[in-house]
Amino acid sequence: MSAHHSWHSTWHTAWQGGDIVVLRDDEEVDRFAADRIERVIFVHDGLPQSVGELPFAVVELAEEAIVLPAETGFAGRVHFERQAFWDARACVYWADLRSAALPNSCLARGGFGWLQRRVRFARLTRAELSPWMERWTVQGPQSWDQRRWQRIERGRPFASASSSTSHGGGAASLR
């Protein structure tokens, strides 16, 4: 496949039974059992975002880690189709993009100007990725809804003085 063609590929992820499948141009390129997932780390840039705006996610299995860039749709489609699955496992964590460096094997050059680097799909051993991830600022476990309610509560004027006006009780009642 030429570099030009791969740059314009269409990626997505989907549930197939208990597996999560990664597809490029509607052809399967990877598959893993969801019950083997030990941790999911969504990387964010600190701003309130929709799931499609998260730069990338890392899925940790026992021996491997899978880097899923935003264009795979993992944060949206796979996460939101089965929120109860993720909430029950309490395996969703969050990392700040400023600390979330990746090895060169997870990056590709391209975009507007060849100096720009972007995250690409990759499957690595955890041993390959762990020296990088040890420097990440990771928080959690925290579901998307818990994180959203926490942001809402922090953004309210006098939030600490008035908990009786809270919609849904805040993050503490969502546990």
Image (cartoon, rainbow, N blue to C red):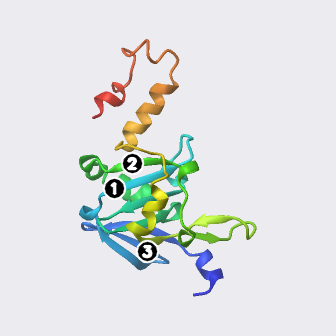
Q: Mark 3 or mark 1, which has the lower sequence index?
A: 3
The answer to the question of whether label 1 and label 2 lie on touching residues, with beta carbons closer than 8 A, is yes
Query: Please, is residue 42 above or below residue 6 in the view?
Result: above
What number is the disc on residue 23?
3
Q: Amino acid at mark 1?
A: Arg
Instruction: State which mark lies toward you, 3 or 1.
Output: 1
Classify residue 38 by image quadrant. bottom left
Residue, disc 2: 93
Residue 120 as seen in the image, left or right of residue 38:
right
Secondary structure category for the residue under label 3: strand
Q: Residue at x 43, y 32 (%)?
A: 150
Q: Position of residue 108 (x, y in %)?
A: 61, 71
In the picture as drawn, the residue positioned furthest to the right comes out as 113
User: Label 2 crowding class (10 Å Cα cut-off): few <14, some 14-19, many 20+?
Assistant: some
Is 141 situated above or below 131? above
Report, in whole angstroms, how far the alpha carbon at label 3 lies from the one at label 1.
21 Å
Residue 121's x, y, as percent?
49, 70
How far apart are the two marked residues, 1 and 2, measured between alpha carbons?
A: 7 Å
* Label 2 element class: strand
Q: Which residue is mark 1?
A: 39
